[in-house]
Image (cartoon, rainbow, N blue to C red):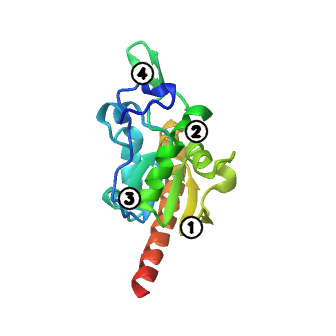
Amino acid sequence: MDCRACALWEPASRTVFGEGPQNAALMLVGEQPGDQEDLQGRPFVGPAGQVLDKALQDAGLQRHQVYVTNAVKHFHFVWKGSRRLHQKPQAEHVAACRVWLDAERRLVRPALLVMLGVTAAQSVLKKPVTISATRSRLFHLEGETQGLVTVHPSYLLRLPDEASRQREYARFVEDLRLAANYIGQAEQCATEE
């Protein structure tokens, strides 16, 4: 909890590790904690977390079934008046936190790891990626784990109009349904063995 592997620890309130069942078949990896996550010490509890919870439910999943975490464990922000504004983590922050994400992955050993956004995808895949080129398809990571890339729920909050938000939310739910179907099939195969 007192990680000081990069400079983000100093202004942040706390380290925010993942949470969920240790044996979760599904792991969701986001970018970094936001303002509310930093204050509460839990991942995905702010506005993006509310979008994620609704989308999980619409896809037939429940938050308590999945392990949720972030590629970066401290909130990267700048002050604007009395507000803390999110800043994209830098490569050095992602690299410094990789040891923690790798430890969470070894602990949980998910059947499917869903990368929410480009920072999460680049952290897990250790190479430059674009969402458009990798989104909505399953691919092998290592061992028994498959990967899936989709958008980060905060992306949906930043869209400029309601039609775009509805269209992209539906695509996000479809990606999570793909994850739910894969997990369902993997669990069925495990019980048949």
Q: Secondary structure at mark 3?
A: loop
Numbered disc in front, either 4 or 2: 2
| Depth check, front residue: 12 or 5 | 5
Q: CA distance from mark 4 to mark 3?
A: 29 Å
Q: CA distance from mark 3 to mark 2?
A: 24 Å
Q: CA distance from mark 4 to mark 1?
A: 37 Å
Which of the two labelled residues, at mark 1 and mark 3, occupies the earlier sequence position? Answer: 3
The amino acid pointed to by label 4 is Pro
Q: Residue at x 47, y 75 (%)?
A: 186
The residue singled out by tag 3 in the image is 66
Name the image quarter holding the N terminus: top left
Q: CA distance from mark 2 to mark 1?
A: 22 Å
Q: Residue at x 35, y 50 (%)?
A: 19
The residue singled out by tag 4 in the image is 11
The amino acid pointed to by label 1 is Gly
Name the image quarter holding the C terminus: bottom left
| Depth check, front residue: 18 or 98 | 98
Which of the two labelled residues, at mark 4 and mark 1, occupies the earlier sequence position? Answer: 4
Which of the two labelled residues, at mark 4 and mark 2, occupies the earlier sequence position? Answer: 4
